[in-house]
Image (tube, rainbow, N blue to C red):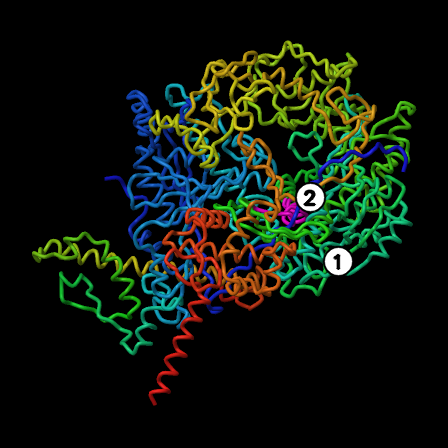
Amino acid sequence: MRRPIASPQEFRRERALRRLGTRTPYCTRCGGRRPWSWHPSALVVVCGRIICGECLAAARGHATRQDHHLFGQHNSPATLSTPGNLHDALSDPQGDWPDPTLTNPEANPLLRAAAEKRSVADLLTVHAEAIEQQAQELERLDQALRAHLGDQWHAVLGLNQEAE
Amino acid sequence: VTGISSAEALPLFLRAHIEPRPTRARQSTRRKQSRKPVEPSEWALIFDVETGTDAAQHRRFLCYQVRKAGNLRREGIAYEPASLTRAEVETLTTYAVSQGLELLTVNEFVEERFFPILYDLAGHCILFNAPFDLSRLAVSHKAGKGYYRGWFRLLLTNNPSFPPVYVKHLNRHAAFIQFAVPPGRSPEQRNREHGGNLEHHRGAFVDAKTAGDALLGGSHTLARLAQLLETPSQKLHVDEHGGPLTAEYIDYARADVQSTWECYRSLDRRFQEFNLPLRLPKLYSEASLGKASLRALGIRSWQTLQPDFDPALLGKIMTSYFGGRVAVKRRHTVDRVLHCDFLSMYPTVCTLMGLWRFAISTGIDAEDATQDVRDLLATVTPGQLRKPSFWKKLNVLVEVAPDGDLFPARSDYAGSGELSIGLNYLTGGRLWFTLADCLVSTLATGKPPRVLRALRFRTRRRQRGLKPLAIAGNPDYLIDPRQHDFYKRLIELRRQVKNAARDADQAGDTVLAGRLDAEQQALKLMANATSYGIFAELNHSHLDPAQIFTCHGATGDRFPTEIHRLEKPGNFFHPLLATLITGAARLLLALAEHAARDQGLGWVFCDTDSIALSKTDQLDEDTFLERAHAVCDWFTPLNPYAGGGRLLEIEDVNYRLHQGAPIGELEPLYCLAVSAKRYVLFNIDDQGRPVIRKASAHGLGHLEPPYGEESAPRAIPPPALPLRKLGLQRWHYDLWYRIAEAALQGDPSAVKLDDLPCFNRPAMIAYTATTPNQLAWFETYNRKHTYAKQVRPFGFYQAPILTDDGLPVGQDPDRFRLVCPYTKDQRQWSKRRYTNIYNPDHPSFAISTSLRTDTIARVTSYRELALDYVRHPEPKSLGPDGTPCGELTRGPLEPRHIQVGTVNYIGKEAGDYDETGPANADETATRYADARTRELAEHTRLILEHSTRTSIVNLTGLSPATIRGYLDERTQPQPETADKLNRAAVTLARQQVRKRGIDPPQSDRAALERHAALLAESGPDRICEGGCGRSLDGPRKRLCNGCKQRQYRERQRIRRRSTMRAA
């Protein structure tokens, strides 16, 4: 089997961005204030507007927190109450798990252990994405401040001491 | 006027305006506009296909790179198992293992690399000459249908889950390429299911050739592009293509991919300099750049702002449109010349005339200026034209009644069906020209033309939402469209940056010099891209079936015409600006001619923005130069740019060469001109031999070279400048050398061609199969071959040139053109069989340069072609003997005097013969014939005679009296009325055909013809039994509608009476 050209996560992300029609998606209702509302898996298009799962649930009078089957519902009934957007972000990669691991019809303990490992890996990946997202936002902020206040914007705002 | 020859009647051909049909009003004004799909991702796939050298040029292997954010992620080779031997596959395998590359088959590459990266990950596809490479990947193809008519639909794999790729050839620089919409549920479709309005993602294909040609001008090979952009990896050289596969050859192929990537990066960086809201995959030409520049300045197109502009006036404006002036004054003589050109001709005339205010206005209005123009023409002197303020008054169109006046004219001068534009004495008719053209005539003839009417155009208020643009993102290069004259500012900025680059270079700061040089190039390109072409942009779209439109010509002519090729205006189409700009450019050339005459100088040729001033016999060298400089200085007051200087500049070609570069010392330059655009400029060396400095390849560039540089005759000295700089192939150079040599010996037509190799072989033109129509000629050939061996999209074929007496016996001269799949082996040219494109199933023909039979066509050899080339006449001028310039005419030429005969209307003159292929008969300018005068009128009358007056009144809105007058042939309808009647007839014909259970044809004409045929089939008319005498249209009808109603009313009346009686 040849190595695929990109990870399933990259393909998934690209599909989501194509569905949303932008490379910098955010929830047009909460403006990105809700946690994980920037994550492409957590965003949907409703009447042409991009909106996060939590805002959609709130608008429909549903709960914004949801129970997430951390190891997959066939492996364990244990759930974790998470923000709706994080639930979407964590559920999406479960679709890429091997089918036997996800469904585990024979309650195979090894596959269950594999599911636990995969769930932790997904959790770390999603958090890594969040950290990268924050880094990108800081870089965008820097660009915007440079455009408005010049390259020495931190001196203009008197932030040099803090930087040191 | 003295010295004008007697007039001869010739038909004139004028450009016309085709009124677009009103588009159907949207059902809902709240309908949302579709949104562009997501922008391409950071992924990129770069590949280059290596092919065999056979006629089919089938793929052998390809090298590719996969990059993310510019970083190399994967590199590999994909091969076609059927095209390689086992040993070659082993060579590839060994190479791939040793270099750590992936090795796939082409099919695996397509399914596992091409589509995942370009479609699923929305990456960039970076290629050089993209249509060719993509067509080599195809496993089958079809001709596009509907909207995609004229496109190729390439299927890259037999797996139906992957979308086909559509490719449409635009010109030799660019093509549209996009994915088709794939089957199944795509992310964009999911968006629309939830109320979104995303367009489908169609891929981001970047052709480095297209981008390079648009940003650097000209047409470049990969080697040349890499050289110009100074990329770290240059294209490697191999001795042989198509031979056994070796590691060196694979190195060469990999280097091509790397070089393509580096060229793309460099071009992308240059493109970013413009700071425009346009992505590189959408850059097709300079015009794309110009349009994006105007959009970045917040300028909206005139068409959108003033859609209701009077179409009749547009027709008049279009008839006054002619291109740049190209002419020869002295033919087949060797003259000492000084070759000069105008500084940035089109931006300069835009600045002089203040046309920027037109570009940023919300519209234009015309006002009468007849008396002003008459007064101006009666009193104008050349001195007035030296004042820049005078040029601001030239935004005027004039209707004249020519009487021996010198005006531009478009005609079939040689009677060969080929149209060309000349400056001729005209007599008769009523024609529209720019005021600049009237000034040219007044200066040349000494008398003003008879002005019937003149219209001055004024601008409306300035557009709102204009915004400044910083070129290259640099605030120093800020252009504010509200404050600056865009063109003036661009040229001034360019001059500043050019000077700064020179200073930086002298100071040794090569990095800064390089950056500034790129910026000045960007400024130059932007000035050229926005100053003319985009205002005259008309794009063809084929109509199948042909449809009837209204054509507007000069003097308010308006008539319906049937069109199969519609001209769709470009986004910034502004015909008034286009005609004013070219008119003013012709005036500048005429002034140069006038100034030269005042100084006692002549001229040999002029070409759009340049003129070759010639020395007369009476003058010595110093006096000639002094006077030529005076001519150049004459224009200096007209220089509108800060810093001043000459407007008419002396070209580099006049200066002595030192180590291949011109130095600041003039060297005597000589010129020999054959006809328009066919000339050579040369120095004479110590031994009296010509040293070619500049020559034209016009009329030769499309031919296959009979020999290469290595076979050039030794008797001809090698060129003083690299052939690339001269823009010639070696055999062009040799031919011009021989022509100049013969001219220096006294007779340019006695050109010596004996020692030019292969000149007795048939002259051959190589074409690319760029449209599905061209491929249809090879259907018979393709049926006999597997797909790999067929002539396929963007493959090559060749065509010989038939001599005048070369038609095989029994063939129709209008339907005979030969083609054959391409082969580079010249010895095969005479031995191969050729197919007549008009009858591909007919047994093929042989060719010969000497013999003609019923199966052998006599074709032109390079020798005959070269002799024809040097004798090519200039039929739009008269020779010294007062007859139209023929093959043997020599000496000074004069404009012909034309008695205006019929005036015909045409569309845009098509691109050159090279691009359109041998079946160019359909590709020349569309001629707009009056549909009223044709049989269509008969069909119209027939259907209207068989319809009720009420239905005609309802459909046309005309009065019954008008309709009766037309049907009784008592009145000739006005164009508008005829148009309405035609439309009503088409509608009624469709209704009638549909009533008989037949689907009516789409074409208007076909619908009318079908109805006429049905009427003829149904035999003589049946008469209404009600006694009214009307004919019946339906086969089952007994009564006409009127009698039926009358009888119904009668029955009702009787029933009412009987009811009353009973009561």
Which image quarter: residue A46?
Answer: bottom left
Magenta span covers which residues?
Answer: B522-539
Kindly report the distance in space between the C-alpha atoms of the residues bearing marks 1 and 2: 21 Å
Q: Which residue is mark 2?
A: B14
Where residue B957 sits: x, y (%)? 57, 65
Residue behind mark 1: B457
Q: Is residue B526 magenta?
A: yes
The answer to which image quadrant residue B216 occupies is top right
Could you tell which of marks 1 and 2 lies nearer the N-terminus? 2
Q: Amino acid at mark 1?
A: Phe
Q: Which quadrant, please, contains the N terminus of chain B?
A: top right
Q: Nearer the viewer, residue B219 or B353?
A: B353
- The question of residue B162 being in magenta is answered with no
**Label 1 is found on which chain of the structure?**
B
Q: How many marks?
A: 2
Q: What residue sits 71% from the left and 48% below the top?
A: B579
Residue that lies at the very extreme toward the left in this rendered image? A106
Q: In this image, B337 relative to B521: left or right?
A: right
Asked if residue A131 is positioned above or below residue B337 in the image, the reply reads below
Q: Position of residue B210 (x, y in %)?
A: 53, 40
Foreground tag (1 vs 2): 2
Name the one closer to the observer, B475 or B1043: B1043
